[in-house]
Amino acid sequence: MSRPAAALHVLRLCSVFEPPAARPATAPGSLPGELDARAARFDPIGGMQNHTATLTRCLDAAGVTQTVVTARLAGPRGTTPLGRGTRVSRTGLPVPRLRQLWALSGLPAVLRAGRRAPVDVVHAHQGEDLATLPLARLAARVHRAPLVVTVHCSVGHTLTGRGPRVRLLRALGGWIERTTFRRADAVVVLTGRTAAALRADGVPDERLSTIPSGFDPALFSGGAPDVFPGVARPRIGYVGRLAPQKDPATLVRAFGRMREEASLVVVGDGPDRALVHRLAAESPAAGRITLAGFVEHARVPAVLASLDVLVLPSAYEEMGSVLTEAMAAGLPVVASDVGGIPEVVRDGRTGLLVPPGDADALAAALDRVAGDDLLRARLAAGARARSAEYGWPALSARVAAVYDRVLGVDSDLEPAA
């Protein structure tokens, strides 16, 4: 049986999605998708936010109707259009400690989703939260639709740490994950490592699909001006949330221990902002550190094009979608050898891998790439070649194929250009 792509209605549930635009794209000096910085700083934009938004846009361009229900962050509450056939409902309280309540306040939007058109698929995106999966199971039951889950971070298998929050997430969240994944009609993971872990947990192999995060080729199609004209080269850059998971503090410490002369550019915002700023001010290389703050995702390609090396020093990581964007920009990567990162960064071919939390090892790797132009060029060429596997239009078509499989239909859906 076949169906036209436009006949498909997906209800997408995700605790994080990019905030609404601060002003229309037609406003002077604005870019498409330019975001409300206040909302972004509530929960600074990272891989999951970009993943859910870009996937939604690609499927929208291919004619898929979508209803997105997500947390409001610190932005306004309400429903806004996105693209041709997508509506985004942002709900919840703008209080970080009460963010899980977004699912309860989003329940009316979930129940109303079928008024637009019957819901064909419920697609939940699981990160470091507990509320999305129970809401998704309820939605699938109410709308009598198959359930697809994408695992952005498995709290049972990927999350690390010793605090009470981590212990709660691993215990309660791990149980919620296992019971939901075993009942879901399909589970999408970003890496083979997570696929193996879920398979060992009892998820049938035929329900598992490995589809990584990617990059939007449209954002990397043109030249970009130098974003940091006053910063000396080589430029070592970090782009992402300033949060314990990403461990930017170890990068700042490592940079201060380098022997080679280089510059460090830190792009991002988040709960570790004060720590990173303090370490930068105390660093023996303080005069060569630039703290650039939050940058909208639409400007990230220009930021990456202005760097010479990207660093991702994560303590734990499901995949790290900024890695694919860095490769698309032709940047060698130095990253932690954790989680799914080694499946993206090929050590010695597209970048260098180091143990997590080891500032001395990170400093040594940075000295290697900063002091060897030929090594940087070789790794950059390998990175650019490998990036061809991570374009979002093709990846979104693979997600649509998962929808078709759970619906038992053949689709004429084509990847968005």
Image (tube, helix red, strand yellow):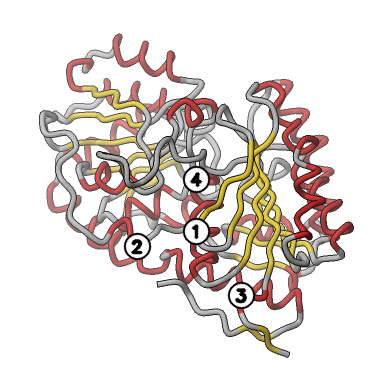
The residue mark sitting in front, 2 or 4, is 2
Q: Earlier in the sequence, mark 3 or mark 1?
A: 3
Residue bearing mark 4: 47
Q: Position of residue 82 (x, y in %)?
A: 52, 54
In x, y percent, where is residue 174? Answer: 78, 42
Residue 127 appears in the figure: no
Q: Nearer the viewer, residue 128 or 8?
A: 8
Residue at 70 percent of width and 58 percent of height:
11
Q: Is residue 233 left or right of residue 342?
A: left
Looking at numbered disc 3 in the image, what kind of residue is underneath it? Ala
Distance between the alpha carbons at the discs numbered 2 and 4: 16 Å
Residue 6 - label: 3
Sequence-wise, which precedes: disc 1 or disc 2?
A: 1
Between circles 1 and 2, the one closer to the viewer is 1
Callout 3–callout 1 Cβ contact below 8 Å: no
Query: Mark 1 = which residue?
Result: 83
Give the alpha-carbon distance from disc 3 to disc 1, as whole Å.
13 Å
Residue 273 at what x, y percent from top left? 43, 19
Q: Is residue 376 above or below residue 226?
A: below
Quadrant containing the C terminus is: bottom left
Disc 3 + disc 4, Cβ < 8 Å: no
| Label 2 Cα crowd, 10 Å radius (few <14 / some 14-19 / many 20+) | some
Q: CA distance from mark 3 to mark 2?
A: 23 Å
- Position of 91 compared to 306: left or right? right
Mark 3: few/some/many CA within 10 Å (<14, 14-19, 20+): some
Amino acid of disc 2: Pro
